[in-house]
Image: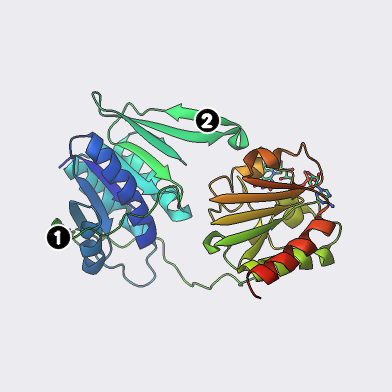
Amino acid sequence: MAGIWIFAESREQTLELISAGTSLARQLDGAAVVTFATSRQLAEEYISCGAGEVLVLPPLAGGQPLEAYVPAIIEAVRGGDPDIFLISATQRGREIAARVAAALDTGLCSGCTALKLDKEKKQLIMERMLYGGAAVQTVVCSGRPQMATIPPRTFEPAAPQEGRQGKVTELAGVQPSPVKVVGRAPKAAEAVDITEAKVVVCAGRGFEKKEDLNLAQELAQVTGGAVGCTRPVAEELRWLPEDLYIGISGKKVKPGLYIGLGVAGQIQHVTGMRDSKVVLAVNRDENAPIFDAADYGIVGDLYDVVPKLIKELRIALNK
Ligand SMILES: Cc1cc2nc3c(=O)[nH]c(=O)nc-3n(C[C@H](O)[C@H](O)[C@H](O)COP(=O)(O)OP(=O)(O)OC[C@H]3O[C@@H](n4cnc5c(N)ncnc54)[C@H](O)[C@@H]3O)c2cc1C
């Protein structure tokens, strides 16, 4: 079977990896893209979006964790002998990838943000960031399959195409895992999910006190966005929940518009927002590194600039 294989926790992440996989497959003279799915309905969707074959995993019995699929995945991979196996770098995806790579005695490059190909050698050239995003490491894998975990939202999701056909194969039952999930409770919803927001207003340490964050909230409300922050605002000052900080060790955001207010723009922060479509920064220091990452910059005191920005936006947006 060979080709490029994909496993991800969710539909959205699977579609992102299908997008990466089909791009690699084109360079490998149309190699097969094989995806795992957890239902026949998803299988049909993955085929319409570019998968050539979908392996449908059986439903897990109640209380079984996702990791219970590991033996079935290993068996399928041994049988199919893929050249490349991409797994979404979610918490459980990373764990599954590590277990599969260990069982297959192959290499795994975790947290890849770019994939290239040496066509002749069928060698995957993987890139990932190091030292808080200050350096890029290039990794190749001498074993097969060449395995990588890819952070969510690294690639755009694949879109459906008319008239695509593919093969659906149902995999046999899954052996029960010795690990049982005894309960699931949603994390207390302290904050909105900034990774989904179209506009992110990011508060940095340029704010003098917690109450002043109302300015960021107001700007977010006018622009229909959500408030995020830098790490010190969440971890040191504790003005906002840790769910809201952006950067290498926080959330990675990719909004249409990112507005940084009093944000220095250190590499550890920029790593989490550099893929935003448009970046606007307000900082009173004209040499602040955030301006290197910005499309638009306003050098000024945020306490002067932001109220004016809100006023003008209210007029322009009729709000
Ligand atoms: C291993 C490691 C991981 C890290 N991970 C992250 C991470 O994931 N995310 C993250 O954010 N950071 C992270 N950091 C911290 C990071 O290096 C920076 O220290 C942090 O991003 C700085 O936050 P800041 O820009 O809010 O604050 P500061 O560095 O204090 O910058 C404040 C900025 O506001 C400007 N300013 C001050 N007053 C005003 C005003 N009135 N009007 C306009 N501008 C004003 C200043 O000129 C300055 O540029 C990490 C650090 C390490 C070592």
Three-letter amino acid code at the position of disc 1: Gly
Image height check: is 202 above or below 75?
below
Across and down, in percent, residue 286 comes to: 78, 39
In which quadrant will I find the C terminus? bottom right
Question: Can you identify the residue that label 2 sits on?
Answer: 136
Which is more toward the observer, 313 or 237? 313
Residue occupying the point 57% across, 65% down = 193
Q: Is residue 289 visible?
A: yes
**Element type at marker 1?**
loop
Q: Is residue 2 left or right of residue 182?
A: left
Q: Does residue 238 appear anywhere in the picture? A: no
**Relative side of 282 to 148, left or right:** right
Count the numbered circles shown: 2
- Identify the residue at horizontal 62%, vertical 59% (top origin): 200
Q: Give the colour scheme of this rendering.
A: rainbow
Residue at (41% x, 66% y) in the render:
180
Left or right of 52 in this view: 185: right
Question: Along the horizontal axis of the image, is 200 left or right of 157?
Answer: right
> Looking at the image, which residue sits at the far right?
208
Question: For this rendering, which residue is in front, 148 or 59?
Answer: 148
Image quadrant occupied by the N terminus? top left
Q: Nearer the viewer, residue 297 or 274?
A: 297
Dot 2: element: strand
Q: What amino acid type is highlighted by mark number 2? A: Val
Q: Which mark is residue 163?
A: 1
Could you give the CA–CA distance between mark 2 and mark 1, rounded to whole angstroms? 40 Å
Q: Quadrant of residue 10?
A: bottom left
Q: Position of residue 41 (x, y in %)?
A: 23, 68
Determine whether the beta carbon of the residue marked 1 sits less than 8 angstroms from the nearest atom of ligand 1: no
Residue 277: x and y, percent? Answer: 53, 50
